[in-house]
Amino acid sequence: MFRSLVPFAVFAALYLALALFVTNSYYQLIMTLVLVWACFGLSWNMLSGYTGLVSFGHASFFGLGAFATVLAQKYWGVSPWIMLFVSAGIGALAGLLIGLPTFRLRGHYFALSMLAYPLAMLYVFQWLGYPEISVPRVLDRPALYMQFADGRVYTVIALAMLAGVVTITRLVERSRFGMALIAIKQNEAAAEAAGIDTFTWKLRAIAVSGAIAGMVGSFYAIVILVVTPQSVFGMLVSAQALTVAMFGGVGTVWGPIIGAAFLIPIAEILHAELGGYLPGIQGVVYGVAIIALIILAPEGIYWKARDFLRARRGSAVVEAAAAPPLVAVPLPVAPDAPRRVGDEVVLDVRNISKQFGGLKAVGTVSFQVQRGMILGIIGPNGAGKTTLFNLLNGFQTPDGGQVFLGGQDMVGKKPSQLCKAGVGRTFQIMRPFKRMTVRDNVRVGAYVRARTEAEAARLTAQALDAVGLSGIALRLAGGLTTKELRLLELARALAGQPEILLLDEMLAGLGTDEAIAVVEVIRGLADEGKTIVIIEHTMQAMVRLVDRFLVLDHGEIIMEGSPQTVTRDSRVIEAYLGKKWVANA
Amino acid sequence: MTLLKRLLFAGTALAAAGLAAASAHAQGKPEPIQVGLIAPLSGIYARPGTVMKMGAELGIEDVNAAGGISCLGGAPLELAVIDSGDSVEKATNAAQRMVAEHPKLVGATGAYLSSFTLAVSEVTERANLPLLTLSYSDLITGRGFKTIFQTSATSGAQAEIALPIIMDLAEKQTGKRPQTVAIITDNTAASLSSVKRMKEGLLADVGLKLVSEEVFTPPLTDATSLVQEIRRGRPDLLFFLPTVISDSKLILEKMQEFRVRVPTISFGIAIAEPEVLNTVDPKLLEGVMSAVANWGKKGEEGLIKRLKDRYGEPWMTQNAISTYGDMWLFKTALETSCSRDRAGLAKALRGLDAGPSKYYPGGTLSFDDAGHRKGASLTIIQWQNGVPMTVFPEALALSAAKWPKP
């Protein structure tokens, strides 16, 4: 944690030195505004950067903070020193009030409805009779009211505020809070399946984000001295947060800082140098510059620079990382040797069924899974495998029947509850967080079980070890091969210490050698006592892996038995290949 | 001089500057005195800002042609133009830039929109730089500042001045005083504060009864309901307070379509900007009156012609004439202070007593403690044959008022 703040401390020290050196009041103001917009960008980043829920309405919190501060001083003589913190509270409260109804929406709908809040407030404040309002000037002991003749003081305050925001962001980033948000961004359903209560975490995020924005708005009012609804609730304010964050890089603490440090001075220099000479041209130049940068670095300067630096550091690092053997525990290949399977029933499925309109996707299916067993569910496309799976992990509710896990009926439970009860799953379509390391990806899954950060770290290490990814734990997930991604998903499910693992098409898209490697990892897990249910569409690799097959066709179990029996059964061949092949079998 | 200009003219600048300095020195010509114009020259308010710049340029030209500041050896005035941009933040930044990068400024004028003026004056007050302004929000002079000088009557005062004049005019020309009034206003700051003042006593004072009040948010998409409300109320007068030209057009057209012929009095210059004619038929405008803080008046015909010849402006709005007058006000005060010092100029402006005002309507060239120009009045203009003409005060009128026939 402290190490992660070192680069910022260096930046802050340099910035402070520069700020103290600048005596021109205009440059002082610009230096302060860079920090103000960096903080605001970080506030936006807290919600939108990490959860991926784009907010076009951060001006709501900003404006409320600004108006609260000016009005409190004007009518009750409350000092901005106090209002800075009150505004943070107002921002947090507004965040909760806005989040409660708005988080029901997703994607563009969320973004658009967020846009409406500041615009509505704009009219409310106009209607209240505050078309423009200025911070009352205090001549007697102005410092008590945060009024200083020397602009450098504001820069110092803003820097302190930024330091606070960066620390909060770092804390969030490294804890289960940040991991939960990031998981939501990757795939909200997967996050829910990994045991994350997504709604609650989103509310926490918008409250923290709103608190920061409220505080920044409050400080902004003090610096700019005049507040109008348009200047604090306007579209441009919300856009400013997006612009600095997207320009610098989303989902990192450095993005908004870089964005603000570039854009604010550039806009001002253009304004100062070109504004009086050819009015309006500064807007054109600024716009063109932003367009060019977005084309060149769509994810923002920070990520572009990082990729560039990593590429330059050369392949030596990558090779060093790749050097240790990928599969840490080379297992003796003994595919046909019978394995010991316990008698204890982990999963007991009784007569579950699911119907979509007239289509019977799953009709009265029953089976049991014993501890340490690998059960393969196979069947041709459309056989009802995925529906059956979704019934088991809570994404869909069966029309009838029961699913007992450790003796308890789990029908009707939410995915996150099932996950907590010990059902781990992987997804057919892999959605890793590409910009995070392998280790952090796995850590997201560990939080279901882990109570402390230390425990999460331990579970993560165990899971990585079990799938043989320890050697590349610090690599970014974006650069992994399909096989490594499959193992990563497996490790994430494992990190939550599940009783039973549900694996959805783990071998899809893998070459023969790769499939064998993955199969061996899964077998290793089973040998350690993990119970595994695996859905697969192709039979080949499965024959070497599973203890028992369950063959589905048209939503019914047509066959259940050992791999040898199943592959020779005429009904299975018919289901897969059609009737004419049965004779040839 | 900006960096860009420096780069562009780097080659010739040295030689030219050397020559100029040499000749200036040889003739013993005093260094110019810098005054600032801080106004929106880019963004959505660029148009009025540009007109202010025209007025300032003409003003500087005339002051210098009249011998500059004679007390300072005939030193000419020099204009420093600062773009205030189109937002409060940009205006604040621009004001900081102005005081930091133009240390020689003795005073400035600006910044068109009252919220920009509020922001700019917060900065200039702290820098002790005198700021003249044509903005008329009451807030500007309500903060106890010592270096702000408001040349227009405040918006509250404007309604107060205008209403009795309008009533008298109606009575004189039609033989009876109007009894009822309808109000259509947008919900911008200036409009709402005027309407508030009217409802809180001004209407009652002149004996007008409010029969309907319609508030809309610009931009308007359909004026039917607004106009029907007027038709239902059958008022003797309509007070019309739009800020956006397209809104005035919509409402006037709808009134024509519905044959609602009520004498219409507007407040502010939105209905008399030259751009109005781009979209509105002059016939619709004929007879419409507006109360504005300042306008091209009797005695300024030469100026109006110069503005037209040089810049193509068809008539002189408040932005041009008030800013023009500001340059003369600077001269008058500089002759009193006789120094190149900001504090000196501020002191001179505060203590100024230069008799009747020439370029601003009514009152004198003197200011009270808050910075209001003493006795500041306004002008009433009326669209006549496609041109908004000053019709009040009568002494300054370019044409006689004709009460619109209902």
Image: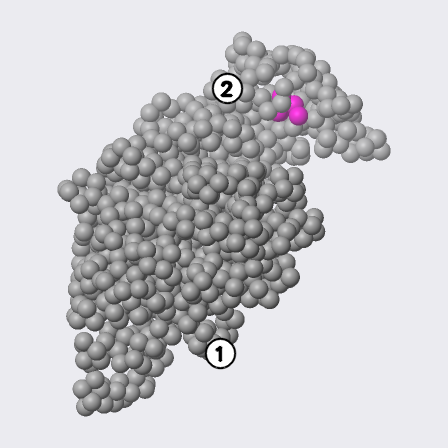
- Badge 1 element: helix
Name the residue at the front extreme. B175
Q: Where is residue A337 in the image (x, y as percent from the top left)?
A: 56, 25
Q: Which residue is drawn at 29% across and 80% down?
A: B66
- Position of residue A580 relative to residue A291, above or below, is above
Identify the residue position indicated by label 1 in the image.
Answer: B309
Residue A390 lies in magenta, yes or no? yes
Q: In which quarter of the image is the C terminus of chain A?
A: top right
- Which residue is depicted at the point 35% across and 73% down? B59
Contact, mark 2 vs mark 1 (Cβ under 8 Å): no
Q: Does the magenta stretch include residue A62?
A: no
Q: Which of A507 and A496 is in front in this view?
A: A496
Mark 2 residue element: helix
Question: From what the image shows, is residue B395 above or below residue A368?
Answer: below
Q: What amino acid is at disc 2?
A: Gln
**Residue neighbourhood size for the residue with mark 1, other residues' Cα within 10 Å, grouped as few (<14), some (14–19), many (≥20):** few
Q: Main secondary structure of the magenta part?
A: helix
- Residue A236 image offset from top left, x and y in percent: 45, 50
Q: Measured along the vertical axis of the image, is residue A338 above or below residue B137?
A: above
Q: Which residue is drawn at 35% across and 48% down?
A: B138
Q: Which of A327 and A347 is in front in this view?
A: A347
Q: Could you say which is closer to the camera, residue B256 or residue B10?
A: B256
Q: Which residue type carries mark 1? A: Asp
Query: Which residue corresponds to mark 2?
Result: A417
**Extent of the magenta region:** A387-391
A306 left or right, relative to A381 = left
Query: Looking at the picture, does residue B172 appear above or below residue A115?
Result: below
The image quadrant that residue A135 belongs to is top left
Of tags 2 and 1, the one toward the viewer is 1
Q: Can residue B138 be seen in this view?
A: yes
Inspect this view and state whether residue B218 appears. no
Q: Which residue is drawn at 28% across and 38% down?
A: A74
